[in-house]
Each structure stands twice: as structure tokens, then as C-alpha cells.
Image: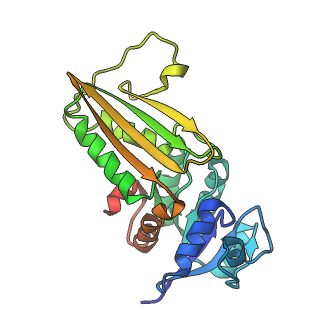
Amino acid sequence: MPAIDLLVCGAAGRMGSEVVRAVRRETDLRLVAAVDKERVGEDVGEVAGIGALGVTIGNDLAKAIASSRPKVMVDFTVPAAAKGTLRLALERSVACVVGTTGLSQADLEEVAQLCVKNDAPALVAPNFAIGAVLMMEFAARAARFFPRAEIIELHHDKKLDAPSGTALLTAQRMAHSAGCALEPTTDERAEAPRGQLVADRVRVHSVRLPGLVAHQEVLFGGLGQTLTIRHDSLSRESFMPGVLLAIRRILHLKGLTVGLENLL
């Protein structure tokens, strides 16, 4: 089976560089292009710290797609940039694996329409760590048995969106799980110290500090007991098995898929 030709958008960033390193180790994946607004003209392998790969970082996505003809684009940028990169890639029938968080529901609806119009699949995942996906699954199950729950999510200080996409999806899955026992929350105290209320049932608190990577606690409270479900990503390598899985599976999907759990 031929290798999957891959373009990484946001290739000079922390997650983009991690993807470059991970792809380099795989025999069935081939990096053919790299795009970023930073480090333009440099070899992406040198930027990622693994030596020259013969792929130069460019800043023109349309040109990169035309010249390299990738089958899949991996996007780890920022929400404002991702909207345009996804539109451009899907219009050229390039499948998209998206780790950029902070996309709105309206953004996702537009992506879904582009997927159908151009017969090109996309997967958007707020978290590619397998443990984080399991945490969300366990939290959704626990929501059937406890009346109250809150989420604390902790990330590095460079993360732009808050709450995180993982926390929002966790709260939504909890609130809409079959047999959910969580009570609607009413709280007249000031909103800011009490965090953001999601689906009228789960409050989410965001922490941004240097030294953190990606961490989340889901705390449940009931009569005389509490339950805590926690996941910690201690390095960005923790996301790579999920990213590689998505790259390998994306060409077999149709339309827009939201959440890595749909591939497990």
C-alpha cells in the first residue's frame, strides 16, 4: 500500500513539530509539505530538531497543496487561521485532521458543508490523547449516578482558548448522556469565580500556567461521597498515537467527524 502523503499546517509550532517528529518514524506516512507563518524557508526537520528532511516551510497553503498534492492535511494552528486553512484544503479535496481547538459550532457547520460539497472528509478532535477520550467516556457514564459535577481544566499559559475544547466536550457529553442524573444548576453568586456553566449542569474552571501541558479533572459530588476522574498529558507525545490513528483512518471516513472516540 502506498504511503499517505501529508501536509502539516502550523508545522513550526509545538504541536506541529511533534507531528513532524512522529510522522518521520512511520513508514506508511510521508511528509510532503509544511506550512507556517513562522520559520519560513527553513527545513521543517531542522525546526523540529531531527535533521533536514528536504521539506521547506512555506507560508502559502494553496501553493503548497498545488505543488505537493497531499492526501491529508494536519492542522494545529489557531482558530482564526484554521477557518481559512480548512476551507482552502477541503475545496481542493484534501482530507483534514484538525487538532486546533476553539472552533465554534457555526465553524463546524461550515466545515461539514464543505466536506459534503467537495466530497472530502474532516476529523476535528479537541483531544488526541487516548486517555483523555477514555476520561470523557467514564465521565459520561458517571453522570448517570451523581447529582452534581464540575470540571477543572489546566493547560500551559500559551493556550488561547478557555475553557478548553476537551472540557466543553466532556461537559456536553455528561449533560446529554443517557440517564443523566445531573441536576440543573442555579447559583446566584458571581459567575466569574464559579466558572463557565455548560448545558446548565456542569461548571468548568480554567487554569493557565507555565509548566503545564494538558490536564483535566472531573469532580462528582453526591450524598456522603465524591468521585474524581483525572487525565494528565505530561508531554505532547501523548497526543501522537491519536493523531497517527486519525491520519490513517481519515481517508475512509465521510463528511465531518467530531471526536477521536468515533475511531476507537
Q: Is residue 72 above or below residue 27?
A: above
Q: Residue at x 37, y 44 (%)?
A: 230
In percent of width and height, residue 102 lies at 56, 44
- In front of the other: 153 or 127: 153
Please count the marks in the image.
0
Counting from the top left corner in percent of width and height, residue 142 is at 24, 38
As displayed, is residue 82 above or below residue 223? below
204 displayed left or right of 42: left
Say which residue appears at 42% left-offset and 58% top-offset: 129
Any part of residue 162 in sight: no
Residue at 32% in and 20% down? 184
Q: Residue at image x 38%, y 24%?
A: 200
Specify the quadrant that holds the N terminus.
bottom left
Q: Quadrant of residue 56?
A: bottom right
What x and y, as percent, mark residue 74? 56, 66
Q: Is residue 263 above or below residue 45?
A: above
Image quarter of the C terminus: bottom left
Looking at the image, residue 165 sits to the left or right of residue 145; the answer is right
Q: Quadrant of residue 140?
A: top left
Front-lying residue, 56 or 105: 56
User: Residue 225: x percent and y percent?
Assistant: 23, 27
- State the residue lying farthest toward the right: 41
Residue 204 can be seen, yes or no: yes
Q: Nearer the viewer, residue 120 or 165?
A: 165
Q: Which image quadrant is residue 255 in?
A: bottom left
Residue lying farthest top?
188
Q: Does 16 sit above or below residue 77?
A: below
Visual colour scheme: rainbow
